[in-house]
Amino acid sequence: MDVKRRTMMGAAAILLMLVAAGCSGGDEAGGGAGAGPVAAPVSFDVSLTEFAISPEMIHAPAGQDLTFSVTNDGTAQHTFAIDTGGELIETPELQPGETRALEVPALDAGEYRTLCTISGHEGLGMTGTLMVMAGGAVAAGASGTAGATGSHAAMTVEEMLNGHREGVEAFPAETEGLGNRRLEPIIEGGDKVFRLTAEEVRWETKPGVFVDAMGFNGTVPGPEIRVHPGDHVRIVVSNEMSQPTTLHLHGVTVPNDMDGVPYITQDPILPGGFFVYEFDVVDPPGMYVYHSHFNSTEQVGKGLYGAFIVEPKHGDWGSLYDERVDVESTLFLGDGPTGFVLNGKEFPATQPIVAKVGDGVLIHLANDGAMIHPMHLHGYHFQVVAEDGFVLAPGQRYMADTLMVAPGQRFDVLVDAEYPGVWAYHCHILPHVEGPQGMYGMVTALIVQ
């Protein structure tokens, strides 16, 4: 194996760290016949293409050696590197079709950057995140027996039980910031005016875990905008970030010059600048989205998205679907630099959907991540009543308990809350939701009281 290491600290400091690591734990816990078994490295499969690293987000356990099987599936030379903060561990330049192994010593819990070191490739999107979690972690992209469900080799049975229990007992855990809150318009001459500010923020996804994010009005997702058919709308977008941005209204019918695509329909909004998006609402009631369309792999991945909901008259969703609606909820699916999140939060900090027995529950689902997420509800079959903002005719509606939501898709689903209890609601790609340390990521619950 040919691995390059670029040192980012003095050799003496590294030597001191290695000596300290080798001497830690005292004589009784040292090597020799009395030492415990060494856990096998956790393995991961990584694919490099133009211009992406897949998976973009990798979860790994702290304190355990890692091995990355890196394949160049593209047509140009690429590398795969991990920035540990002290050094850059990377493969040599890989030719198209070539596979190399990258071995990484055990890392402390924390967030590490992955990237291609070929000049210009990082800026084109070849970057990602290695999330190292204490107590073991699901390994997205992992291969082999241990990696398929996350490694438990470093955990005792008691530690696994405690991890699962503590997560459930903490739900819903409190964190700083709450996204998806309704943004009230300013009424000017009969127009509905909404003000959004794109900002770079530190966002708490679950207790004690902060990520570098981007949010509209400081939150992930941004605030929820609600309008009605026939409204004349102005959205004033200010850019307080260190890079340009734009706003695209996904699925919304707008004039061409309001479509938010840089250098096709508008100039980018430079740092310190603003742009006014103005249009009449001509689409039917339903779930739509707004998000960045500049450097969108990073900007949307880090949280520049939000809900744009066209409401029926008087907000009467029950009449629109000819079904009882007592509880309404919006659920954004996200992945990438923020982790596997629902409305910007990771279990146990996700918010439950709460209803009473007999209620009709309407859930607006939107996926603004980069991966497909099959959303599964325990204990119930739900009715899919709308797709991409269009109401399905009664004969086109269907029942399901798992709904595949692709990037960019939106659905409305209805649940008849017949059965009391706490019912898990989660992505069914298991590396997005649960490992030996318990549930995490894209997990919430329907609580029927």
Image: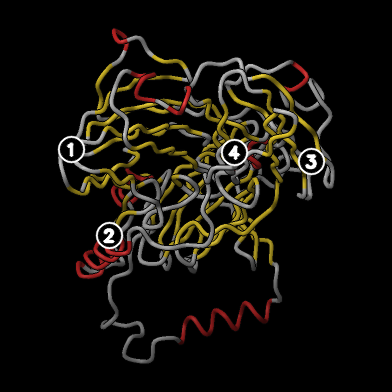
The residue under label 4 is: 305
- Which type of secondary structure does the marked residue at label 3 adopt? loop
Q: Which mark is residue 244?
A: 3
Q: Nearer the viewer, residue 178 or 29?
A: 178
Q: Which mark is residue 379?
A: 1
Residue 238 lies in what quarter of the image? Answer: top right
Instruction: Kindly identify the amino acid type of the residue bearing the numbered disc 4.
Output: Tyr
Image coords of residue 442 (percent x, y): 39, 46
- Tell me, yes or no, whether the two marked residues, 1 and 2, touch with CB atoms within 8 Å: no
x then y, percent, for residue 299 = 66, 41
**First of labels 2, 3 by sequence position:** 2
Q: Is residue 423 above or below residue 225?
A: below
Which residue is farthest front?
Answer: 189
Q: CA distance from mark 2 to mark 3?
A: 41 Å
Report the Cα–Cα distance between label 3 and label 1. Answer: 45 Å
Tag 4, which secondary structure?
A: strand
For disc 4, the neighbor class at 10 Å (few under 14, some 14 to 19, many from 20) is many
Q: Is residue 255 above or below residue 296?
A: above
> What residue lies at 34% left-to-right and 49% top-to-bottom?
352
